[in-house]
Amino acid sequence: MAETEWLFVALGMAAFFAGVVDAVVGGGGLIQIPALFSAFPGASPATLFGTNKLSSVVGTTSAAIQYGRRVAIPWRVTLPGAVAAFIGSWFGAKTVAYLSPELLRPLVLGLLIIVAIYTFRRKDFGTGGDQLPDGRRPVMLALAIGAVIGFYDGFFGPGTGSFLIFLFVRFLGMDFLRASVSAKILNVATNVAAIAFFALSVELLWKVAGVMALCNLSGALLGSRLAIRHGAGFVRKMFLGVLCVLIGKMGYDLLLRLH
């Protein structure tokens, strides 16, 4: 097998596992982005981030559809949140031209640690039934969450799915399964906005993205079925696992930069 073919096989496998993880709790970028940087060390970061978004949006959309067939989606808050996330992600991507995303790394690491500690200590957090309160407050909260996390995803990105799930559980009273499907819908919006920006600004690796998208789609189908079959408790465990990996990776990267 030629070197190029092996490269596509390796990227396809990375995309498949990323799709499984991303469909349950987000965090697929932890797998796909390092794989892309290893495969194309000479490419610009913007090209690789845009290619990653092209690949992952297919799996994320598929997971959202799979969830939507079996889980009641709280559209009253999810749809406004998705619109706000789309706008926030577009402006976040534009801000990369003026500020370095690396400035956020220590802050994000601290927030992830707080989220992990809170979830570990609250054993019942996100595992019970969920009932959105009436009135405008949930909608306003969803708009704020969508705008802030959407901007963050466009600007920096790591942990976007985890932040969305945590905020939906903490402030909107969802269980982990409902929060996960809502996060998927917002993630589709942020990915589409970022793709639109990157496609107009940099050259993307369309052939690579196509191969990875098919594999990511397969992984997303498996991940969403696992989450639906095993429920909120399973999603909570995956959520904590991805959080720990995120914290470890970002902490390691930060130590490398300090030295």
Image (cartoon, helix red, strand yellow):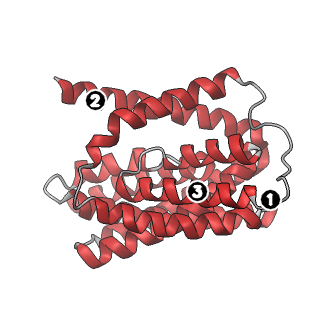
Front residue of 245/155: it is: 155
**Secondary structure under the numbered disc 1 in the rendered image:** loop
Name the residue located 50 percent from the left edge and 54 percent from the top edge.
148
Q: In this view, does 235 lie to the left or right of 246?
A: right
The mark that comes first in sequence, 2 or 3, is: 3
**Secondary structure under the numbered disc 3 in the rendered image:** helix
Question: Rounded to the nearest whole Å, what is the CA distance between mark 2 and mark 1?
Answer: 39 Å
Q: Where is residue 49 in the image (x, y as percent from the top left)?
A: 32, 59
Name the kind of residue labelled 1 in the image: Val
List the residue tagged with mark 2.
Answer: 254
Question: Rounded to the nearest whole Å, what is the CA distance between mark 2 and mark 3?
Answer: 29 Å
Q: Which mark is residue 71?
A: 1
Name the kind of residue labelled 2 in the image: Leu
Q: Residue 144 carries which label?
A: 3
Front residue of 50/89: it is: 89
Q: Which of marks 1 and 3 is in front?
A: 3
Q: Is residue 256 left or right of residue 133?
A: left
* Quarter of the image with the N terminus in it: bottom left
Q: In this view, does 104 lie to the left or right of 177?
A: left
Name the residue located 69 percent from the left edge and 50 percent from the top edge.
179
